[in-house]
Image: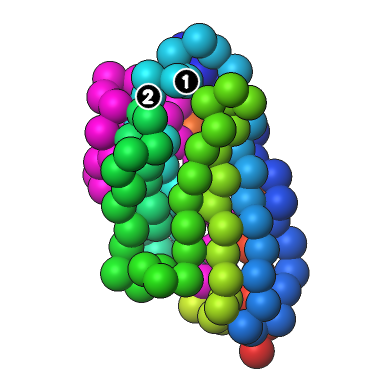
């Protein structure tokens, strides 16, 4: 099992940057794919980025490609989301998730069995 805790959210102006961190506990972390999802009020939780168990493969939503970077440090049991050139439409609660059943970066939220509580990201105009 994996326990996840996100941090790093906050308020930032459009065009600014923010780095989210997800601290994980559990020995299965190093073999699990990890993902970031976000949910704005009144909307479905949507895929943002995912990374394979060894960091060799990544997937990004078209809306964030070129602006966001997902990475992981298995020695520290941590996954990161570096967010640059932030836009107001990036405002949402961001969730970290672990897919302990696969090491590949799925874009489907139902593939992930473990979730953090989320961290709020607000981008002002």
Please say whether residue 83 is visible from this viewpoint. yes
What number is the disc on residue 86?
none
* Residue 74 magenta: no
Q: SS at mark 2?
A: loop
Whether tag 2 and tag 1 are in contact, CB under 8 A, the answer is yes
Give the side of residue 8 with respect to residue 30, left or right.
Answer: right
* Residue 98 magenta: yes
Q: Quadrant of the C terminus?
A: bottom right
Please say whether residue 113 is visible from this viewpoint. no
Nearer the observer, 96 or 83: 83
Q: Residue at x 37, y 19 (%)?
A: 31
9 up-or-down from 67: above or below: above
Q: Residue at x 65, y 56 (%)?
A: 19
Instruction: Name the residue beneath numbered marker 1.
Output: 29
Percent from the top left, x then y, of residue 8? 71, 51
Percent from the top left, x then y, of residue 83? 56, 64
9 up-or-down from 89: above or below: above
What number is the disc on residue 32?
2
Nearer the observer, 43 or 91: 91
Give the side of residue 77 with respect to residue 102, left or right.
Answer: right
Tag 2: Cα neighbours inside 10 Å, few (<14), some, or many (≥20)? many
Region rendered in magenta: 90-114
52 up-or-down from 108: above or below: above
Q: Residue at x 39, y 52 (%)?
A: 49
Give the side of residue 125 with respect to residue 112, left or right.
Answer: right
Q: SS at mark 1?
A: helix
15 up-or-down from 22: above or below: below
Q: Quadrant of residue 93?
A: bottom right
Percent from the top left, x then y, of residue 62? 30, 69
Percent from the top left, x then y, of residue 26? 54, 13
């Amino acid at each position: 099992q994996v326990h996840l805790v996100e941090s790093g959210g906050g308020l930032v102006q459009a065009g600014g940057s923010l780095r989210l961190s997800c601290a994980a506990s559990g020995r299965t972390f190093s073999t699990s794919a990890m993902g970031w999802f976000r949910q704005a009020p009144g909307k479905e939780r949507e895929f943002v980025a995912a990374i394979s168990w060894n960091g060799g493969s990544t997937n990004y939503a078209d809306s964030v490609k070129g602006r966001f970077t997902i990475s992981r440090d298995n020695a520290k049991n941590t996954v990161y989301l570096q967010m640059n050139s932030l836009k107001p439409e990036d405002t949402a609660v961001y969730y970290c998730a672990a897919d302990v059943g696969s090491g590949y970066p799925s874009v489907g939220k139902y593939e992930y069995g473990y979730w953090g509580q989320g961290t709020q990201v607000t981008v002002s105009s």
